Structure formats: C-alpha cells, structure tokens
Image: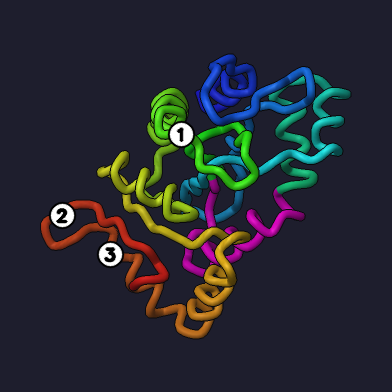
Amino acid sequence: MLRELEKELIKCTQKCDGINNNPKLGIIPRCLVLEKRKGKNNCIVVGLNPGKCGRREREYFLNTGIKHSSFSKYFFESNLNNKPYFKRTRDLITVLGFDGDILWTDLVKCEGLDKNGIPPIQTLRVCINRFLRKEVDIFKCSTIFALGNVAFDFCALSFPNHFIVGLPHPSGSYGVFIRLKNKVQLDTKYFTNNISRKKDASNNFRAIHLSKV
C-alpha cells in the first residue's frame, strides 16, 4: 500500500499554490521514502517540504524517467547518506533508541516556489489530507519526529493518537540542532527516559519539543 501511494505521489497533478511541480524540467513531488533498518523501534520523520532539487537531480529524473524506481534509487544513493538533513536526523534518533525502520516524509511533498517560504495553509491542508494521513495509517508506529516548528505544530494537532517529538531543523536552525544533539550525547539517559513516556497522566499521547524538556 505504501509503494502504491509513493507511485501516486510522484505523478500528482494537483495545482497547489506556492509550490513547484514541473516534471518537464525534472521537478517532481518527493520525500516519501521508507528506509529499512535492522532494529525494531520504528518511527516516522516529518519535515515541512523538500528543498530545491539541484541540476544533477533534475537531469537524473529526466534521463531515467519520472517513476518511483528512479526516485527511490537516487534517494538512497545520494540524498540519504550525503545530505546533513538526513544524516544528522538519523544519528540523533538512533541515539534516542529508534533503531528500526524510518519513514521519511514531509507535510507538503513539492518544493516551494520561494527560497525560504512556508507553503500556504491551503496547500498544507490539501497535501496532508491527500498523502500524509494515509502514510501514517499505513506505517504502523506510534512515534512521529517532527522537524521544525511548523511540522511540529501541524503534527501535534493532526495526529492526537501518536506521540509527537519536535526537533529543531537539522540543517537550518542556527546551530540549535547541533547543540541539542550534544546535550543528548552528554546525558542520553535523561532524554531517553523522557521520551519513553509516550502518554500523559490521563493516558493521552504527548506532544513534546525535545529542546524544551
């Protein structure tokens, strides 16, 4: 089911505001990938939306075709291991005890038209309901790591039946992410004990920002 949703995503023809989706130029919806790992403690990682794809990435899609296999291969060969966004996040959540599969995704799957702009609320609503809710239903795990304040706020409000852990943006938070990672490494037990409590005293799932615990 997840694979079919990935195929649907790449061929999405929604004309949402504030985003760039132009397959003729090699610019496609992306950021829905399952990374398989050997551990058992799985999680979902949700960002805001993908950054601008570079010339090499666009040319790759144009040469290999706009299809799921092309996107998946590029992601695992290039982005997953080389980009600080993925490496820093994976390293931190692994230290926190999440050693299993990771579903990498975003609130909005298309890159923005503006360099640093947040997608319009309507675009966020449409994409979350069209894709993210289905992804969360398909990928059965209770913990969602949300990267950045916008992702944290939306996930906290959209998924009350999941434990939401907010993290600073791993590559755009003025060193906040690195400082948090250093704190976690210095006192790992304190942080792992905190996030081991997925529910509050009334048995509701918690939504916490790790840099504020």
How far separated are the C-alphas under marks 2 and 1? 34 Å
How far separated are the C-alphas under marks 3 and 2? 10 Å
Residue 89 circle label: none
Residue type (three-letter) at the residue carrying disc 3: Arg
Q: Measured from the top left, where is residue 151 in percent x and y?
A: 44, 47
Q: Residue at x 54, y 48 (%)?
A: 101
Q: Residue at x 59, y 14 (%)?
A: 13
Q: Secondary structure at mark 1?
A: loop
Answer with left or right where residue 58 lies relative to residue 123: right
Residue 120 circle label: 1
Mark 3 and mark 1 lie on one chain; the one further toward the N terminus is 1
Q: Measured from the top left, where is residue 168 in percent x and y?
A: 49, 62
How many residues crowd around disc 3 within 10 Å: few (fewer than 14), some, or many (20 or more)? few
Q: What residue would you read off at disc 2?
A: 203
Q: Measured from the top left, where is residue 70 in percent x and y?
A: 77, 28
The residue sitting at the top extreme is 13
Q: Is residue 170 above or below residue 116?
A: below
Residue 197 circle label: 3
Q: Nearer the viewer, mark 3 or mark 1?
A: 1
Quadrant that contains the C terminus: bottom left
Mark 3 and mark 2 lie on one chain; the one further toward the N terminus is 3
Q: Check if residue 98 falls in the magenta segment.
A: yes
Q: Check if residue 69 falls in the magenta segment.
A: no
Q: Measured from the top left, where is residue 119 in percent x and y?
A: 50, 36
